[in-house]
């Protein structure tokens, strides 16, 4: 699995971020929102069918989070820490390689 | 040398803005404040003020543009009144919450309905919980001076809160008086170049402003706004003292007049203080121990000064041009809360007067006086709130 391109940011933010309230609630650590794992909002999760994928990258381009990375071979990797389950990737995929399935816990 | 010019309070406010050298002014015209941005746009067009004048389509946009500019890191100014201030309401909280030291001039005007363009303080009083510092001017000179002082306080690192300076519609906004315009160099020394310490944009220091706060953080952010407003009390006193040193005019959060042996003290704000002092002189001549007090700073509320005033007298009577529908006038309500835990406190009365531009006359003050005197003689207050100058015959 490809590594998150945000890995360095996440580590830096975790290291530097303090909870100390600043005047105006200003956040002085850029990119620190990576600490908020927004994937917990998801109702549907995109499930990837590698065998159907044609590596067109449309999902990668359209994901608004962005929570799709590309692995060494150019296949999409879904980062469920941040994927909010909007289904845009599934909608855009010309090969129907992404299936939205209800999260059950 | 400072020069003296005859001018309206609106012009005095524009001159104050010019002297403070804001980099961005965004404003939308509204009676009775229109002349403020009009005059400033003239200064900008003439090259007398090096600033960006943003013409906007509403007051909501005017204050939003000021928030944007202040967040980018420059000194800003705007002016409005009444409905315009009400339209700014949600952004006023944002300006305070983001701790942006915006300064705004207000020509205090009544709120609709019915539509009324004349003076009372309902517009600014209704914004008392937004986190803005509030000053009220008695005359045109005070309008100019208090705007300069407002910048000094708002931008202080211990405060970082926006401030509004109110002056009464028409009574001041459109009435000419001699006003001393201070020297630019002295104002420059007093205010200094604006150097934002927290809110400014710099690619080398990326920050996020206007953040979201979950329940785990929101209260702390609000607490810090409240705490900053508490600290403003001391900073205002310092600014008043420095202003007096440099410009020779004295300001106090509460200015007292003939209060030393007063059995009854009448408290008010704004231009009505002038009338009240004259009337106190008349009452003194008639042999009554009456004093007056003028609240110059309404937010933060001058708690200690009210307590000191209360110790001096048997009755505190408030004459105010606003009404909290469902209770009393706001100033009386706040002062009552201030004194609630004091062991000894005077009797307290509230008089609602002069709403929607009705002149507050000596006859009306005498009406308040006879009610106040009765309370003093009987040692009790039957009705805490009384409307004076009310035309009962048309009710
Ligand atoms: S469901 Fe939405 S958020 Fe999740 S990977 Fe697809 S496009 Fe991105
Ligand atoms: S859009 Fe579909 S086919 Fe294209 S890369 Fe994404 S999963 Fe593969």
Image (cartoon, coloured by chain):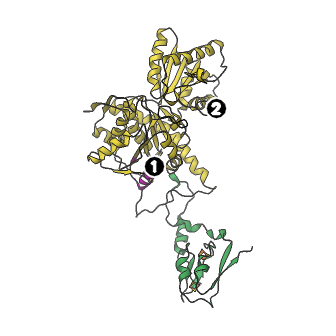
Dot in front, 2 or 1: 1
Report the side of B141 relative to B86 (left or right).
left
Residue B29 rendering spot, x and y as whole percentages: 41, 43
Q: In this view, does A91 lie above or below B119?
A: below
Query: What's the chain of the residue with tag 1?
Result: B
Label 2 near ligand 1 (CB < 8 Å): no
- Residue B95 lies in the magenta-colored region: no
Residue A3: in sight, yes or no? no
Query: What's the chain of the residue with tag 2?
Result: B
Chain A rendered in what hue?
A: green
Residue B173: in sight, yes or no? yes
Chain B rendered in what hue?
A: yellow
**Cα–Cα span, label 2 and label 1:** 32 Å
Quarter residue A71 falls in: bottom right
Camera-side residue: B341 or B154?
B154
- Residues at discs 2 and 1 both on one chain: yes
Res. B58 mark: 1
Q: Name the residue under label 2.
A: B327
Q: Which residues, given as a range, are shown in magenta? A: B58-76
């Amino acid at each position: 699995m490809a590594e998150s391109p945000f890995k360095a940011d996440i580590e830096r933010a975790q290291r530097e971020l303090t909870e100390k309230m600043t005047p105006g609630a200003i956040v002085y650590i850029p990119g620190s929102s990576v600490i908020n794992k927004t994937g917990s909002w998801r109702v549907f999760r995109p499930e990837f069918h590698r065998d159907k994928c044609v590596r067109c990258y449309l999902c990668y381009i359209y994901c608004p989070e962005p929570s799709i990375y590309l692995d060494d071979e150019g296949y999409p990797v879904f980062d469920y820490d941040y994927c909010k389950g909007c289904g845009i990737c599934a909608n855009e995929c010309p090969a129907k390689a992404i299936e939205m399935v209800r999260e059950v816990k | 040398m400072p020069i003296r010019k005859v001018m309206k309070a609106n012009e005095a406010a524009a001159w104050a803005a010019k002297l403070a050298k804001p980099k961005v002014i965004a404003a939308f015209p509204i009676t009775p404040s229109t002349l403020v941005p009009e005059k400033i746009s003239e200064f900008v067009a003439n090259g007398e003020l090096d600033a960006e004048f943003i013409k906007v389509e509403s007051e909501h946009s005017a204050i939003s543009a000021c928030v944007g500019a202040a967040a980018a890191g420059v000194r800003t100014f705007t002016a409005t009144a009444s409905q315009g201030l009400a339209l700014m309401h949600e952004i006023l909280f944002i300006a305070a919450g983001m701790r942006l030291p915006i300064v705004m001039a207000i020509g205090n005007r009544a709120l609709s309905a019915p539509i009324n363009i004349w003076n009372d303080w309902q517009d600014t009083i209704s914004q008392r919980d937004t986190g803005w510092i509030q000053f009220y001017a008695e005359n045109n000179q005070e309008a100019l001076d208090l705007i300069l002082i407002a910048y000094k306080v708002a931008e202080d690192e211990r405060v970082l809160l926006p401030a509004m300076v109110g002056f009464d519609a028409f009574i001041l906004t459109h009435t000419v008086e001699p006003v001393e315009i201070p020297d630019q160099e002295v104002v420059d020394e007093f205010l200094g170049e604006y150097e934002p310490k927290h809110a400014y944009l710099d690619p080398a220091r990326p920050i996020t402003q206007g953040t979201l706060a979950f329940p785990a953080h929101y209260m702390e952010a609000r607490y810090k706004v409240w705490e900053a407003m508490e600290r403003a009390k001391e900073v205002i006193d310092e600014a008043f003292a420095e202003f007096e040193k440099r410009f020779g005019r004295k300001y106090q959060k509460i200015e007292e007049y003939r209060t030393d042996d007063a059995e009854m003290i009448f408290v008010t704000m704004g231009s009505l203080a002038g009338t009240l002092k004259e009337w106190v002189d008349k009452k003194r001549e008639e042999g009554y121990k009456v004093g007056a007090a003028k609240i110059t700073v309404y937010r933060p509320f001058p708690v200690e000064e009210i307590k000191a005033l209360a110790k001096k007298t048997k009755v505190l009577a408030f004459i105010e041009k606003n009404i909290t529908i469902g209770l009393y006038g706001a100033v009386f309500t706040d002062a009552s809360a201030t004194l609630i835990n004091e062991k000894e406190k005077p009797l307290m009365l509230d008089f609602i007067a002069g709403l929607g531009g009705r002149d507050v006359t000596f006859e009306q003050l005498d009406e308040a006086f006879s009610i106040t005197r009765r309370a003093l003689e009987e040692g009790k207050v039957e009705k805490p709130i009384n409307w004076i100058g009310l035309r009962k015959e048309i009710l």
